[in-house]
Each structure stands twice: as C-alpha cells, then as structure tokens.
Image (cartoon, rainbow, N blue to C red):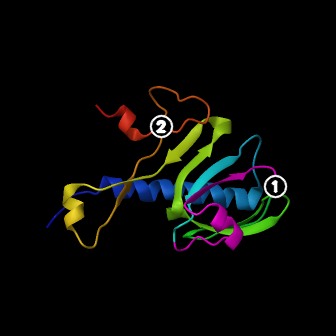
Amino acid sequence: MDRGIDYGNLMHHAMRGLIRDVMDRIAADGLPGAHHFFITLNTEHPDVEMADWLRSRYPEEITIVIQHWFENLVVDDDGFAITLNFGNQPEPLYVPFDAISTFVDPSVEFGLKFETHLDAEDEDEEDETEAPMEHVETAEEAPKAGEVVSLDKFRK
C-alpha cells in the first residue's frame, strides 16, 4: 500500500543530520564564542555507551552539557563519542543520534525536540512502531531563552 510521503521521518532524518553536522564542526574546530549544548538522551537506547554508575543514576534519560570541558569528541554517521566531566571524574560516552530527545544551544535560542507519535494505522503495522518527529520552530514567535517549542504549537 502506498503510504505517500512520510514527512515525519524525513524531518527526523534531516534534523539528526543537522546535529551530526554541528558536532562534526565542533570536533574539528571547538566551540565558537558562547555556543554550548544541552543534549537530553534516552539512556535505555541499546547503543548508548556509558559507565554503569552513570546508567544506574540516570536509568531513563540524562541531559549532558557540552561547554567548558570535553575531550575526545569523535563523530560518525550514527552518533558521537565524547569524554565529559562528571564530578571531577572524566567519563567516556557514546551517544547515538537517534537516542537524542532534545538538542538545545541556549546561546542562540535554538533547540530541537524529537517526539514519538503512534497513530492507529501505525499500531497495526508490525514493522513500524514509531513515527519520530518534531523540531523547534522559532519563526513566528521567538521562544524564551532555552525554551524548546514543538511544531504542534504552530499548527492550526
């Protein structure tokens, strides 16, 4: 059955590509100016790699901050590896792009939010269990600093 154009998945792929491009640039050149990131990720994702003590402390999700101190940032097609400081303890992480639920750069009031939606048609499909979507829209009404806004806010 022809399902038409799946804009939700296309948007999802494009926004993950944007994050990949940003992280590639940071890996090559470092953080410019006041830019920094708050990245929330699902720690239950099977490809997330983190220390056992961190996973037990954050069993569902964690928000990491990439700002003043980070090392060993390496980006691949599926995610990025980075070493961050947790209470003066450097810890390596691997973050798959599809484990990210929010990506925010508060220095420029930019953010992306990824949500999972199921509709009645998708629930009946065995091979499709989620339709990831949504990114932040800032065009009509500027959000407050660091505020993440879903596309649904602008739909009529």
Q: Is residue 51 visible?
A: no
What residue is disc 2 on?
149
Which element type, helix, strand or loop, lies under badge 2? Answer: loop
Say how many tags the image has.
Answer: 2
What residue is disc 1 on?
69
In the rendered structure, which amino acid carries the disc numbered 1?
A: Trp
Which of the numbered marks, if any, corresponds to residue 110? none
Residue appearing at x 73%, y 61% in the figure: 28
In the rendered structure, which amino acid carries the disc numbered 2?
A: Val
Q: Find the distance from the CA under tag 2 to the CA under tag 1.
A: 28 Å
The image shows residue 136 at horizontal and vertical percentages of 48, 41
Q: Quadrant of the N terminus?
A: bottom left
Residue appearing at x 64%, y 48% in the figure: 38
The image shows residue 106 at horizontal and vertical percentages of 65, 38
Snapshot quadrant of residue 5: bottom left
Residue appearing at x 81%, y 50% in the figure: 68
Residue appearing at x 52%, y 63% in the figure: 99
Q: Is residue 150 magenta?
A: no
Q: Extreme front residue here?
A: 56
